[in-house]
Image: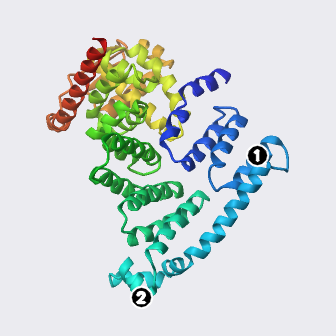
Amino acid sequence: MLNESSDAQKYDLTHTLAPYMDRHMLMPLFDFLKDKGIHPADEVDRAKLQVLFRTNMVDSAMDIYMALHNTKEVPLNMTNRREEVVEAMQQLNTEVKPILDLVQDAELVAQLQKEKSFNSAFLFEKYKITAQHIRTLHRYAKFMYDCGDYAAASFLLTSFKALNANPDDAFSALWGKLASEILTGNWDQALDEINTLKEAIESRGGTPASMQMQQRSWLMHWSLFLLGNHPNGRNIVADLFFSDRYMNAIQTACPHLLRYLAVAVVTTPRRRGAIKDLVRIIAIERSHYSDPVLLFLEDLYKNADFETAQQRLQECALVLDGDFFLSNSEQDFMKSARLYLFENYCRIHERIDLSMLAKKLNMEQIAAEKWIVKMVSDAQLKAKIDSQSGHVILGVQPPDVYQQVIEKTKGLSFRSYVLAQNIEKRGSAQVQTQ
């Protein structure tokens, strides 16, 4: 158990992911680490306390502090901080009341929206709602978010987005809205916000290229919450990560995201045509980042080292089980990985010795036969079992021409991009050497 915990710590990416996450998003990750026992509970609580103290969730911070130190008293700075938060809330409640009363009147808002009058000009003319009131609504939404009331923040930001005319505030509100939807578990709405933000990042004029790359990196990290929660989460992540500009951000700033892309691809049958492109990228980035999931794909598709790939799967299970975003993908990944392992082995070997395979799988021969029958069926391979000779005899697998054309067409632009990236990296390395 100690060795497993040590290995899980080695593969834990929480510290790497944290700089790209809003601090509130780290709370479920900390809870996961604590529940899994990947790190000592007191270490996790200390990290959680450090993050919470920088929010308005002072009561939660106090509870953790008292539990950590087995006391009913808290430091004076915590007490003072709580008083500051309460005072700020009272002040904001007073300032925001005129516009808050209006936006909370669902019937009135619905009527105004129906009449296309829910805008700043009409609200000023009819209800004396000023630009300052609208800015205060934004501040209040941020404050409620920082207090951990994400549903309230989402509601307030929806109203703010409809009334605001400042492009910078609008962009900020998009991030706040996405964070709120993620932390309330509204996955369909979160997807809408991701798509809106993706478009906004590309359309904002005057943004330095380095800042755009940083924003793309943030968006990819935030989208990880959809990976195991949205019904189409794996495709959402794969589509986003494989797009050229986002792949450039991965290769430049955050190659650790290849772990999540790899799992999304392996566990989505219709993505199998992208595996070879993914393996090329993994090979390029190996010196910057690697883990058992990526090494498994290299062993299988680049090196055709079936023995090592089979052994690597045990490490993959440990990696996925200890990853907040991948733990509920472990079974699907292992099932698909074994299937791909079997498929690739079958494409190279015309005959497979059942006793040898049973030994590799640590199974009785009869059980191994049943397993192979299932694998052959799942992989739609032409094969038969010769019980007398104890072999699986594989026929020639006819290619799916239509699917091959689709996959090659989809992959052409992407492969050109990967090649260009590889050439650029080699050129940079030569310049540095000179």
Image quadrant in which the N terminus is located? top right
Residue 193: give x, y in percent of width and height: 39, 57
Amino acid residing under circle 1: Tyr
Residue 366: give x, y in percent of width and height: 46, 22
Q: The residue tagged with tag 1: helix, strand or loop?
A: helix
Q: Residue at x 64, y 67 (%)?
A: 89
Q: Nearer the viewer, residue 382 or 238?
A: 238
Q: What is the distance, in whole Å, between disc 2 and disc 1 at their CAs?
A: 50 Å
Residue hosting label 2? 126
Residue 152: give x, y in percent of width and height: 55, 66
Amino acid residing under circle 2: Lys
Q: Nearer the viewer, residue 344 or 87?
A: 87
| Mark 1 neighbour class, 10 Å CA radius: few under 14, some 14 to 19, many 20 or more | many
Q: Nearer the viewer, residue 72 or 335?
A: 72
Q: Residue at x 62, y 45 (%)?
A: 51
Task: Classify residue 433 as left or right of residue 189.
Answer: left
Residue hosting label 1? 65
Res. 382 image quadrant: top left
Task: Classify residue 361 as left or right of residue 347.
Answer: right
